[in-house]
Amino acid sequence: MNLTGRARTGLNEVQRLLRQQPSVERPRRQWVGDVVAWCREHDIDLGPRLGSQALRFDAALLAQIDSVLESAHLAPLGRALSGLPSAAQAKEGVEEAKATREGPRAWRVLLNTPPRPTQGVGREPRSILDVDLRHLTLAAFGALVQVENLDSFYTFDPDIPALKGFAQPLIAYRGDSHYGGGFAHLADTWRKTRRPHLYLGDFDAKGVTLALDSGATHLLLPEIEWLTEHATPLHQPAEQLPFQRRLRQLHMTLEPQHPLAPYLVLLEKQRGLRQQWFEGGMVEVRLG
């Protein structure tokens, strides 16, 4: 029988309180019941500490619990496994808190970088790297380019006029159920640099809303003349209507000459265009 996560949490709190007082009493319910069952399983005699309504903890009892944990190669009290990656949990003992561990992709992001020839691997126009964002030196990048769609991310080449003004743009996939958490960390960290964050994704109400929510400062879009000619109601379905209210409110706050205004007018006409259909010259469009 394993010591449950909630029992560990309770015992860790009791251990902290015992530094200031000789004993701590807790009612026999929830996690305390788990501790009682665990102690009986491991032949720890609770004796007079255990009453009909409560269990009294003291340093000697916690020392017995720790001794059993040590002999079973389990993490001692005072160590929280929750939130740790599996490798860090392994250093604490053989027990794994899988349900609450830090996911292996929690800090991983997909980057689109210049090609890196590798022996035995055919040369491709761009290299796709899975990296721990904590190992990135963000000062080396002049702008963050967030790409919404994975197929477009794989093929995106940043050698376009709209990005010429940025030294070494950082091209990152927005993420999904696998990489979304890592990109959220990257966006939060990038915001502190106060450098441009460009969003390249579907031109529809939801896409622009995603850009706003991610903290993007600009959109990367085709020029308004080309987009006006090619945008279609087929790429702005009725399901997008719930996102329109926020964009209309944003439109009302913009000056008439704001570069975003004509794009919002196009969206209000229920016309859009998915990223995979973008052609022509791309421009950066300020969001704020």
Image (cartoon, rainbow, N blue to C red):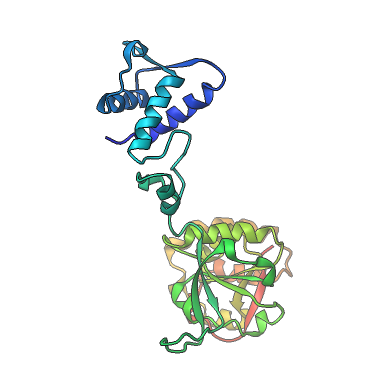
Q: Position of residue 65 (x, y in %)?
A: 38, 28
- Confirm whether residue 214 shows in the render: no
Q: Position of residue 73 (x, y in %)?
A: 35, 41
Residue at x-position 55% and y-position 68%: 267
Residue 140, placed above or below residue 157: above
Which of these two is toward me, 37 or 53? 37
Which residue is located at x 46 percent, y 21 percent?
A: 59
Q: Position of residue 120 (x, y in %)?
A: 41, 87
With respect to residue 211, does 8 lie above or below?
A: above
Q: Name above or below for residue 214 compared with residue 30.
A: below
Question: Which quadrant would the C terminus be assigned to in this image?
Answer: bottom right
Extreme residue toward the bottom, this view:
123
Q: Position of residue 93 (x, y in %)?
A: 39, 44
Give the quadrant of residue 163: bottom right
Q: Residue 227, relative to residue 79: is it above or below?
A: below
Q: Which residue occupies 64% across, 72% down?
A: 262
Exactly how many numbered labels are in the figure? 0
